[in-house]
Amino acid sequence: MIKREKIFITGRVQGVGFRPAVYRIAKSLGLTGFVYNDTKGVTIELQGEQGKCEEFLMRLKSDDKPPLAEIKSCEVTEVSVVEAQEEFRIEASDLAGSAVSQVTADMVVCGDCLAEMADENNFRYKYPFINCTNCGPRYSIVKRIPYDRCNTTMSKFEMCENCAAQYLDVNDRRFHAQPVACGKCGPKVWLTDGGGQIIDEQSDSAIAKTAELLKDGKIAAIKGVGGFHLAVDALNVDAVKRLRQRKQRDYKPFAMMTDSIEKIKRYAVVDEVAEQLLKSPQSPIVLLEKKGDTAIAPAVAEGVSMFGFMLCYAPLHFLLFAEGREVLVMTSGNISDESLICHNEKALEKLGDVADVFLMHDRDIYRRVDDSIIHIIDGQAVFLRRSRGYVPTPILMQQETERDVLATGGDLKNTFCLAKGNQLICSEHMGNLEDAGVYHHYVNSIGHLSFLFDFEPEKVVCDLHPGYLSTQYAKKVSHDEMIMVQHHWAHIASVLAEHGLGGPVIGLACDGTGFGSDGAIWGCECLIASLEKFERFGHLDYYLLAGGDLASKEAVRGVLGLLKKIYGDSFKIEDFHWLLERIEPDKSKIKVILEQLEKKVNTVETSSLGRVFDAVAAMIGLGSYNHFEAQLPMALEAIIQSGIEEHYDFAISDGEPARISFEKMVAQLIADVRDGVAEGIISAKFHNCVAAALVQMAVRARQSCGLDTVAISGGVFCNRYLTNRLIKLLKKEDFCVLFNREVPANDGGVSVGQAAIVAYVKT
């Protein structure tokens, strides 16, 4: 029996060789019809014997589909048979309609392309931009969808005869591979000095010369897929120190790159999960436990217990390491916390005093995209930064939003999110909006993604904090309705969204700061939350912080706030001079802060758990200043002594809301410091105390509301020890535990929670 079916497929099905795969399967089965891309996905009309049509779908959903393809939905409708149709063909893309089709993220160069690049007889031998439908740049070069060459930054490169033949050959893996090119017709690489003077304009020798200069301790700015990296030899102590000085990044750990798992294993512990992540097509930076006594320069990652490693992902990287490099620092090409640089002229302007040489190319980057960062929690991959390789892959909702929603996120580790149809499309990592360049990039990025997905916000959602730049931006946007969402509710909503749930759940949201609905600064919250509403069941008992945003930098402010909370009017500096003088030697500054606390001048009530971590790290003697976000908490985690089960005491008050008190914990901890107890033991007892208190709060919430699912989110849960211990203890109490995996637990996931709340339609 001959039948004809119309098949509509959504998901990651454009720019990954999906149409050629459809063509090849249909031809092998003797089926007729056609396939084309449109703004929503891929449409197929298929005609032939019923059994053959069924086999077609089975093969398309199995291993016959392209490696990078991901089918999210497949709708099949029977239509009228077309008489005298004798072939199956690929038709031109249909540009009509609203764009909701997924844009594929940038992917690591595949093994087939690497083999060709190493083959002296191949016309792409040593070509640093080799790619096919199974690999290479996508999101960073696309200007609009559908994903066709004319809509990318490759449109200015006219294909030569050889490349065009492959591009048009449906049986070739480069059929409609939009960035396809070779040394004759495609982008070129060259090497310049910091003033822009050409050192070498031949790709092969420019790459070899760069490798030689890196060996000699020079700093190179290298243009990659989503922007520039600053590179130095990670084994060269002086070179790493010089990079820190020039980049104005004195403390924050650097990421590293090498070309094999075997090399990474020389310096870090790589388990099976980590190895799969490192070798994945997304090729993220993965945080790995350091091995002792390695040759890595200490300044690469001082004060932390982890190295951040990634494998080469661009052909250019592989060619560079083929010149004999062992391991390179590969850090974002910017100054301090400014935006990643992706344009050649801007790189020379901003990095001319940082890099000794610039390895550049002329394939334009349309979207600057930082490297993604992942660590492992409870044996699973968890984002710290979601960017290259993963963006803009959407999170799918169970229902469709009635109107397009723009969520503007927070101000730190900013992302924004578009809710369109059943998709939550989260942007790549933007950064700190207080930097003017980052804010400018943020505004432009909202415009670009809105254009890319034919998006026009009818609702805009932002953080409750009135001073956030993301909130102020939301107020300027043309829209029908603006909604403000409490920060910690958004954290928990992000967990619900990625797990496809509406709630309610018990939500444990812990971080450094979030504007509360009572005007206080929240940061250790137990919520009963759904996507519809939340109530505050409990929180860390308020203490005072003096100095506003300075408290997130200067740990002494948290220390004094906690001491005043415990001892009240009986607190005397003289009783704690031995503790305070190593945290803040300036006695007059301590007196000023205490006067602020006593008179409540420029102070705020807070339940911030992040500032407690800062204070504990300072009291132990690990430092007194956060030169980058969470520096002190990271140092505190790094020294934990394993095998310690003991914890400090805490109390939870009855009442609405319930309140956690760490007064006993602080007093006991100070006594341990005074008595010379090992730092690692103190850190372990502190972390164990926090975990035990949160579990007890969740137990109380269950007794009150009957829920047995706990969702955890917030920047504090970027702490691996605390999060792993908390999950273990919650499961021991028979809770179902949900945590962020598709977006970061830190503020990089807030926009997804905001969008999910406003997009939610109760079914």
Image (spheres, rainbow, N blue to C red):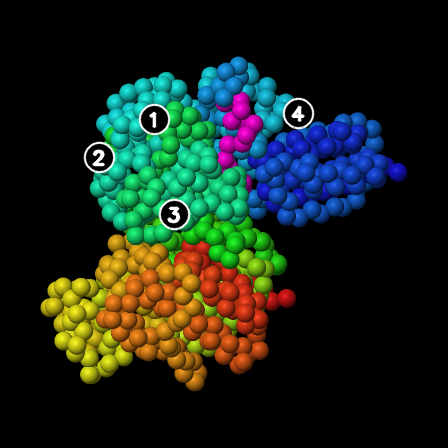
Relative image position of residue 250 (x, y in whole percent)? 24, 47
Question: Over which residues does the magenta segment extend?
Answer: 103-117
Which residue sits at x=37%, y=68%? 685
- Tell me the SS state at disc 1: helix
Q: Is residue 114 magenta?
A: yes
Q: Earlier in the sequence, mark 4 or mark 2?
A: 4
Which residue sits at x=50%, y=64%? 727
Q: Specify the quadrant that holds the N terminus.
A: top right
Using the numbered discs, state the Cα–Cα distance from disc 1 to disc 2 in whole angstroms.
Answer: 20 Å
Q: Earlier in the sequence, mark 4 or mark 1?
A: 4
- Tell me the SS state at disc 2: loop
Image mark for residue 171: 4
Using the numbered discs, state the Cα–Cα distance from disc 4 to disc 1 in whole angstroms.
Answer: 38 Å
* Residue holding disc 2: 353
Q: Does residue 572 lie above or below 203 as drawn?
A: below
Relative image position of residue 335 (x, y in whole percent)? 27, 42
The answer to the question of whether label 1 and label 3 lie on touching residues, with beta carbons closer than 8 A, is no
Q: Earlier in the sequence, mark 2 or mark 3?
A: 3
Q: Nearer the viewer, residue 438 or 710?
A: 710
Relative image position of residue 265 (x, y in whole percent)? 44, 40
Q: Is residue 699 visible?
A: yes
The residue most toward the left is 588
Image mark for residue 290: 3
Which of the 4 quarters of the picture holds residue 466? bottom left
Q: Is residue 234 magenta?
A: no
The residue most toward the bottom is 655
Judge left or right: residue 358 versus residue 602: right
* Residue holding disc 1: 211
Which residue sits at x=25%, y=23%? 197
Using the numbered discs, state the Cα–Cα distance from disc 4 to disc 3 in whole angstroms.
Answer: 46 Å
